[in-house]
Amino acid sequence: MTSAITVALGERSYDIHVGSGLLSRAGHILRPLLAAPKVFVVTDENIEGLHLEALKESLDDAGLDNHGVVLPAGEQTKSFPHLESLLDAMLEARCERGTTIIAFGGGVIGDLTGFAASVLLRGVPFVQIPTTLLSQVDSSVGGKTGINTRQGKNLVGSFYQPRAVLADIDVLSTLPPRELKAGYAEVVKYGLIDDPAFFDWLETRGVAVVAADAQAGRQAVLTSCRAKARIVAADERESGQRALLNLGHTFAHALEAEGGYGELLLHGEAVSIGMVLAFDLSVAMGLCPAADRDRLVRHLHTVGLPVCLPPLPGGEWSVERLLAHFGKDKKVKDGRVTFVLARGIGQAFLSPDVPAATLKNVLDAAI
Ligand code: NAD
Ligand code: ZN
């Protein structure tokens, strides 16, 4: 069964299709949306071996003229050199204004491809077919695209909405368990922001979601996409409430930067720890009952996500160094960092007024 959720953005509105077996129907779902029958598929070498054939068959069946490129897997692909070679490949394949670019992969492929589509010929249509839990519930929806630079992650990019998102739950069955769990942290985030009933549901079904149960996965992806679609439609450019989606992320980005964006912490794992730190901070400021923080820790622990900082190989975590990263956050305005705090599970809010001493105490206790 397939469900569709609309991201309501006026003329640029689009549907997120969520369901099983979508890959084999992708060509027929997309065909009516395309200006011309030519598509260019961007994927990575891991997905190539697992799912590319199924997608190509479906595009062929729908009579689409398909071209494409396979990029190396991993965060380093979200870079200027790969952007350049991707744009070259698109131009060499004679992509035109009416050619639709298909991002077929996780957040790395989605972010890079969306950015390339936004600048190729001053903008060509693109579609997201996300293949990781993280990309299905978060990065494929909402139009944030971009690459990393020497100065930091996601500092160069654009807001550029896809024409459609196709989230096929079945592809998650090949995802390494560690990646699936990491994506699950972003699912928990939606419960924490404003949906306590979803958090209750996750407490019973979360274990099934991280075990790649298709029915639980479908429900988790649907609820998460509904939440993201609603938030993005209300605040596309993040001038206000969209920033709630950064719950745990100010901490997470600092941990990822210090950990070297490597094997130490995947993004979702850093978000898991970051959400706990955001609740620690809320408790320390007297805003949130400690019982809600403990409930969050219990749940993350139950599904196998980290809730405290792992040992830093070859060194020690430093509060000063972590604090220094906060100042570099994209969301800093007039030198002030806006934190996402919570009055409890499902009651997140934005606060630019976090006392420096409390923040330091929370980090001191965490390292
Ligand atoms: P990823 O794209 O690197 O994928 C993780 C790994 O899983 C890769 O090795 C990939 O090859 C592999 N893989 C993907 N699908 C698979 C499948 N079905 N079966 C087996 N292996 C598969 O990472 P990700 O976690 O999907 O995305 C992380 C990126 O997303 C980061 O760069 C982050 O900045 C970005 N992001 C963007 C947004 C946004 O709003 N644009 C939001 C959150 C995160
Ligand atoms: Zn995230």
Image: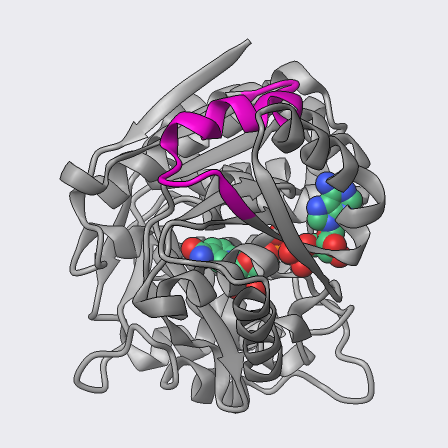
* Image quarter of residue 358: bottom left
Q: Is residue 187 left or right of residue 327?
A: right
- Residue extending farthest to the right is 49
Quadrant of the rendered structure where residue 294 is? top right
For the point 61% across and 69% down, which residue is it? Answer: 89
Q: Could you tell whether 88 is left or right of 3 in the image?
A: right
Residue 50 position, x and y percent, is: 82, 40
Q: How far across and down, in percent of the image, does residue 248 sit?
A: 45, 58
Q: Is residue 35 magenta?
A: yes
Could you tell me which quadrant the N terminus lies in?
Answer: top right
Residue positioned 79% across, 42% down in the render:
177
Q: Quadrant of the C terminus?
A: bottom right
Vertical relation: 66 (above or below) 145? above
Is residue 194 visible in the rendered structure shown here?
Answer: yes
What residue span does the magenta drawing correspond to? 19-39
Is residue 105 depicted above or below 7 in this figure? below
Residue drawn where x is 63% and y is 18% of the image: 20
Image quadrant of ligand 1? bottom right
Q: Is residue 26 magenta?
A: yes
The residue lying at 20 percent from left, 79 percent from top is 333
